[in-house]
Image (cartoon, helix red, strand yellow):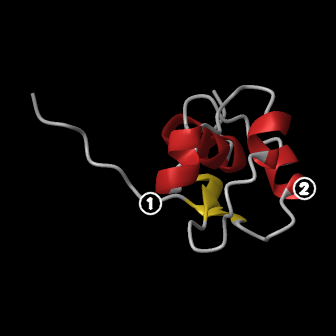
Amino acid sequence: RYFCPVGAVIGLIGARKLLGFMIDTGKCIKCKACMRVCPTAAVTEDSLRIGDISRTECIVCGRCYDVCMYDALKFGVLPLRRRASA
């Protein structure tokens, strides 16, 4: 058996969604251009309001980033979410 450190890091990033796009609600004018180009509908009206793109739907293709004329989208380390207690 072999251990690949690069594969291990990529696996962790993919499993936890540590990297992704975020919406700066201060810059976003809610033109919905990002919503129109998103192939997975990860960007919704709620996303634009709260600045949080669906982590489960987003495939990090960058189309939303490319189309935004207001520099309202940024790519980076996503804030950790706490699990809701039952």
Q: Alpha-carbon neighbours of circle 2 within 10 Å: few (<14), some, or many (≥20)?
A: few
**In this orientation, which residue lies closer to the viewer: 24 or 80?**
24
Left or right of 33: which side holds 15? left
Using the rendered image of the protein, determine whether residue 30 is visible from the camera's viewpoint: yes
Corner quadrant of residue 26: bottom right
Assign the C terminus to one quadrant of the image: top left
Residue 25 position within the rendered picture, expressed as x and y whole percent measured from the top left: 56, 66
Residue occupied by mark 1: 79
Residue 66 position within the rendered picture, expressed as x and y whole percent measured from the top left: 90, 56
Residue at the image point whose x is 50% and y is 42% from the top? 46
Q: Earlier in the sequence, mark 2 or mark 1?
A: 2
In the picture shown, does residue 66 fall above or below 42?
below
In the picture shown, does residue 20 fall above or below 75?
above
Using the rendered image of the protein, determine whether residue 18 is visible from the camera's viewpoint: no
Residue at the image point whose x is 74% and y is 39% from the top? 35
Name the disc covering residue 66, or none: 2
Assign the N terminus to one quadrant of the image: top right
What residue type is disc 2 on?
Answer: Asp
What residue type is disc 1 on?
Answer: Pro
Corner quadrant of residue 59: top right
Residue 50 position within the rendered picture, expressed as x and y whole percent measured from the top left: 46, 54
Residue at the image point whose x is 78% and y is 71% from the top? 71
